Image: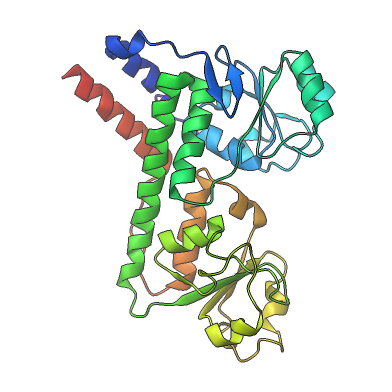
Amino acid sequence: MKRIISVFVIISLMICLMPSCGKKKEYPVTINGVEITSAPTKIVSLSPSFTDIIFLLGYESLLVGISDRCDYEEAKTLTRCGTSSSPEVDIIIALGTNLVLADRELPPDAVKRLNASDVLVLSLNNATNHSELKELYTNIGSALGGKVTGSAHGRNVATILLDTLDDIGRTAFGATEYKTVLYMDDLDGKKIATGDTFLGYVFNCCNINNAADSCTDWQFDKEFIAIADPDVIFCKKGIGYDLRRSTQFANIKAIKSRDVYEIDEMWLEKQGSTLISLAKFIVESTYPEVDTPYIPPIEDTIEKDEQELIEEQQN
């Protein structure tokens, strides 16, 4: 991901142009009870989603290690450091890491050993809705860029991301028929993306009716699948072929029309620029008759937005 001017450099310039803000201390910053006393110089991300976000925020130069599960193309040469449930503590320490970002609590003994080597561990929850996404970006921005610069940058990028999702969702208004969809994580319909899941939130952003929107915690009575009769079914990668030939759900519209589309599980987990690709795929699969307008890469939009902020300060 090449840029003429990195977002991080632009934000730094903004601070130089705003003396009143520049006087404020960036650190220490406390997030989820963890005090970060100075700007991290070497970080490890044990969450594929957080790696996605770090790249979108423009802090990728700080990354020295990633999760074993991470498939982010531009991070593939970085050192693998295990997972949140099983971190490679010795490797993390050997990399000279200042901060570890994880999407769940690390084992207590791992945290103890890392802290003893002056490695901070910050655990954050993945978002499930609009406000949580902004909070997540603000927290990661604060941790990596400071409570003034980084926090503002995180909020700004989250706003641009959400605005882009809205732009994609508005394309659905051109459809001739409002369609109902369902995401199935298994062949039996025992695990369905409900309204409180992040995928359920993405369906709403895309102006698509999620048949399981009123349910929670991935629990949806499979008997209701036939009643909901979704027009389109999205499913976990690897089960689409069998689902299209299902006898259990043979009378559902989506099965009859073969409108069954697989989604890579990693797409469902990431909440950075990959989220834009997911939304586009959902809308284009659900409403193939709609001409999706060109939406510039979100990285370009972020850079343009930050440049405009600088120009405003100069004028």
The image shows residue 194, relative to residue 139, as above or below, that is below
Q: Quadrant of residue 95?
A: top right
Residue at the location (20% across, 24% down)? 312
The coloring applied to the image is rainbow
Q: How many tags in the picture?
A: 0
**Rendered-image quadrant of the C terminus:** top left
As drawn, is 276 to the left or to the right of 107? left
Residue at the location (77% across, 31% down)? 81
Q: Quadrant of residue 173?
A: bottom left
Residue 188's spot in the image, x, y percent?
73, 77
Q: Quadrant of residue 43?
A: top right
Residue 159's spot in the image, x, y percent?
37, 41
> In the image as oriented, which residue stretches furthest toward the front?
33
As drawn, is 199 to the left or to the right of 105? left
As drawn, is 142 to the left or to the right of 303? right
> In the image as oriented, which residue stretches furthest toward the left?
315
> In the image as oriented, which residue stretches furthest toward the bottom?
251
The reply to whether residue 88 is in sight is no
Residue at the location (43% across, 26% down)? 151
Residue at the location (79% across, 39% down)? 85
The image shows residue 110, relative to residue 160, as above or below, that is above
The image shows residue 12, relative to residue 271, as above or below, that is above
The reply to whether residue 106 is in sight is yes
Q: Nearer the viewer, residue 22 or 309?
A: 22
